[in-house]
Image (cartoon, helix red, strand yellow):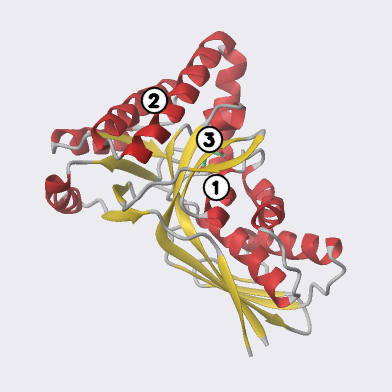
Amino acid sequence: MRAIAEAPAKAIVTGEHFVVHGAWAVAAALPRKVHVTIEPSSRFEVVSDLFGMTGSPELLPVSRVVEAMAREFSEKPNVRVTISSDVPGGAGLGSSAATMVAVASAFSELNSLGLSVPELVDCAMVGERSIHGNPSGIDPAVCAHGGVILFRTDTPPKRISFGGTRSLILTYSGLKRSTRGQIGHVSKMKEKYPGMFEMLARGMSELSLRASEMLREGDMRELGTLLTVNHAALMSLGVSNNTLDQIVDVLLSMGSYGAKLTGAGGGGSVLAVAPEGKEKSIVSGLSARGFETFRVKIPVQGVKSWLER
Ligand code: MEV
């Protein structure tokens, strides 16, 4: 018997980095997935299409999640974990969070633990902490819950519900970066300029609350304006770079309502919203400049798991 789980990728719509320091942020699950299979084995083994096999440092967090769950629920950690993913790593699209959530969910399914979504997020956080240092938890929360969430570290995530779908454009810069390093950089900025940081964090928290209303109402024009303002705040923290700024400029010059880096920055991806009639030409324009760009529809379902005999 084996357990299978699938968890979606994510994009931070607004409020990344500031969310680590107590601000509201908005995140959406995306229609790209990490797929995990867990089956009993004579010892712990892990194989990934992106990161090789047991012993590869990138896969250590997977063993941390399995060991912690085995300890907590008195189960055997002797399992074979197989991971396949269509979420690029280091692209700011939640590849690690989706992996940790899917591993927790498949392990729960295999052992009939019946864990709730918040419990799965807690288990996934063991792996996330070992990768990113001091993450807010927004990434595993949105990968597990799915949909679009308004998130603050001291409150359970609130789902932003709306009828129909909303469309987002994502452009991958092609530059990988470490979330841990970016979070560390922001903490240093906070230490150095506490007053400025406090002001920006308060502003971005308010901006995220407003962005959640705009998503609910489908006011993509105003949402776009908020995205661009958020990008400026992230630039001032020093987590953007020339490539990301250039992508934002191109997206704006081609008629997007707004654009910003998404996730930890320093590389990764840019998120934009655009008028429906312009989305196709924007996607081909960015692709022609060599940046992998795709349009996605949200909302998307969160983690799911099942058994196969
Ligand atoms: C990364 O997707 C989002 C950050 O805010 C880190 C975190 O919240 O854990 C940069």
Residue at the image point whose x is 19% and y is 48% from the top: 286
Q: Mark 2 vs mark 1: which is more N-terminal?
A: 1
Where does the N terminus fall, quadrant-wise?
bottom right
Say whether disc 3 or disc 1 marks the residue closer to the N-terminus. Answer: 1
Give the number of the mark in front: 3 or 1: 1
Q: Residue at x 61, y 59 (%)?
A: 101
Q: Looking at the picture, which amino acid does disc 2 mark?
A: Met
Q: Amino acid at mark 1?
A: Asp
* Residue 5 coordinates in the image, percent (x, y): 57, 71
Q: Which residue is mark 2?
A: 235
Q: Secondary structure at mark 1?
A: helix
Q: Is residue 204 left or right of residue 40?
A: left
The amino acid on which the numbered mark 3 sits, given as a three-letter code, is: Gln
Q: Secondary structure at mark 2?
A: helix
Q: Nearer the viewer, mark 2 or mark 1?
A: 1
Where, by quadrant of the figure, is residue 258 drawn? Answer: top left
Residues under numbered marks 3 and 1 in contact, where contact means CB atoms less than 8 Å apart: no
Query: CB of residue at label 3: within 8 Å of ligand 1?
Result: yes
Ligand 1's image quarter is top right
Q: Is residue 272 left or right of residue 146?
A: left
Q: Residue at x 59, y 22 (%)?
A: 188
Neighbour class for label 2 at 10 Å: few (<14), some, many (≥20)? some
Q: CA distance from mark 3 to mark 1?
A: 15 Å
From the image, tell me which residue sits under label 3.
182
In the rendered image, residue 233, in percent from the top left (x then y), is placed at: 41, 22
**Relative to 285, 162 lies left or right:** right
Which one is earlier in the sequence, the residue at label 3 or at label 2? 3
For residue 236, above or below residue 76: above
For disc 1, the marked residue is: 139
Q: Residue furthest front?
A: 163
Local crowd at mark 1 within 10 Å, few (<14), some, or many (≥20)?
many
- Disc 1 within 8 angstroms of ligand 1 (CB): yes
